[in-house]
Image (tube, grey):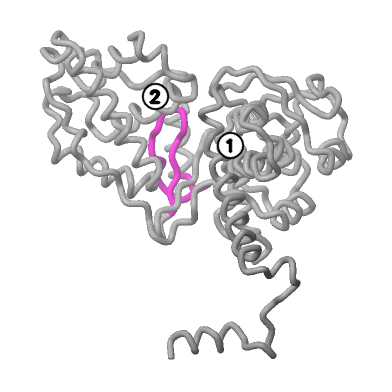
Amino acid sequence: MPKKAHFRNVNRVKWRDEVYYYHRPSGIRLVGEYGSPEFARSWAEAETKPRGARHVSTGDPRSYSGLVDAFQNSPEWEALKPQTRADYSKLARWMHNQGAGNKPASGLTQDRCEKLLDKAVRELGWRRGLYVLQFNRRLYNWVLERAARKKQWGDTNPWIDLKNPQRPKDAPKANRPWKGEELFEVLFDAPPGLRRAYVLGASGMDGSTIIARRWDEYRNGGFYFTRPKTETESWAMVPPVFRFLLEADVERTGHVVLNQNGEPFVEANTLQTRSSDYLRGLAKAGKVGPGLTLHGLRHTAGKAIADSGGTLRAVQQALAHKTTRMALFYSEQADKKRALLDAASAFDEYLGLQSSGFRVSKGQGSDDENHNADNG
């Protein structure tokens, strides 16, 4: 059977019953079924687009693309985190491909913005649709900060009154923590490249950090690294129980995590897509629950540290957060859990159940019987 052609820089998107693909560097939606001649021609054309460009510029300073150009050359843009700048650039390309790029920025009406937002949610999914809204709100708010900008690009923000898109009711919680049994199931089932990615994820790393790790950084069971998203230097200790899975059957040279062809992942998105496809397969087979993601392992690590009594500083260090405020979520959740347990045990103590060893049993009236009596 001939090997299926592989097209780099392609993302697969599923919306309801529709599956389509788009070219990541250019943001262009590809036509045809994956691997078809029509698809190959569309992909080849997208590959000829300028590489690494921020977005497609029209040259008209008053256009939407001219506004994006100005924003991307501002101090406010440089102050954004590197990952945020990369994400915003992709969203700007998507907007240009919808026809907004070459039109006056001041002519973008709220009605048109609503249609663009609906299309983003329909084509890119709920979460990326939300990012489109957030990016454009920020872009036009930047315009409103200066009179000269308002004169060139308009004095209103057509995105500001749009409501955030509704999260689908049946959508699993984004990046939920993994259960212990799910983690072991995946680690012992996954192919070597993904298995090592999951071990690093359970050590607190995100996708962009994982793909950059090299074996020469591995010392005493952990890695010194700089997290690309926050440019924060940190140290991640690999949980001892998982170290043998990281170290097994590998020559410790080059990158730690390799793809199925034995090559490093160029982009975190490629790793995340590969991981998502694999985890969805396990969920369909009933081996794990729905909603597992690679990034969810970071939340698992933070939750494990906080639940075991770890300090804010410990969570911050493990997840390479820039401030302890970013780590506060895990500590607050653990505090709530401990408070509920303390409240339950306090009630037992108040009733004298702990000291006497008393417990309600079938002979003394079951929970159902007592419930019925209360309602009788």
Which sits in the foreground, 142 or 132? Answer: 142
Left or right? Give the position of 367 relative to 143.
Answer: right
Identify the residue at horizontal 42%, vertical 18% (top origin).
80
Determine the image quadrant of residue 249.
top right
Above or below residue 296? Residue 89 is: above
Q: Secondary structure at mark 2?
A: helix
Q: Which residues are magenta?
A: 19-37
Q: Earlier in the sequence, mark 1 or mark 2?
A: 2
Question: Residue 270's mark?
Answer: 1
What residue appears at the point 48 percent right and 45 percent down from the top-left corner?
Answer: 37
Magenta span contains residue 20: yes
x, y percent for residue 288: 65, 60
Question: In the figure, 258 relative to 103: above or below?
Answer: below
Q: Which amino acid type is marked by label 2?
A: Ser
Query: Residue 367 placed where, x, y %?
Result: 59, 82
What separation in Å lies between label 1 and label 2 (alpha carbons)? 18 Å
User: From this viewpoint, is residue 5 visible?
Assistant: no
At 73% from the left and 34% from the top, the residue drawn is: 258
Give the x, y percent position of residue 100.
22, 30
Dot 1 and dot 2 residues touching (CB under 8 Å): no
The residue carrying pointer 1 sits among few (fewer than 14), some (14 to 19) or many (20 or more) residues within 10 Å by Cα, namely some
Can the viewer see residue 272 in this picture?
A: yes
Kindly identify which residue carries mark 2. 89
Question: Is 72 positioned to the left or the right of 197 in the image?
Answer: left
Q: Residues within 10 Å of mark 2 (few under 14, many from 20)?
A: many
- Which amino acid type corresponds to the residue marked 1 in the rendered image? Thr
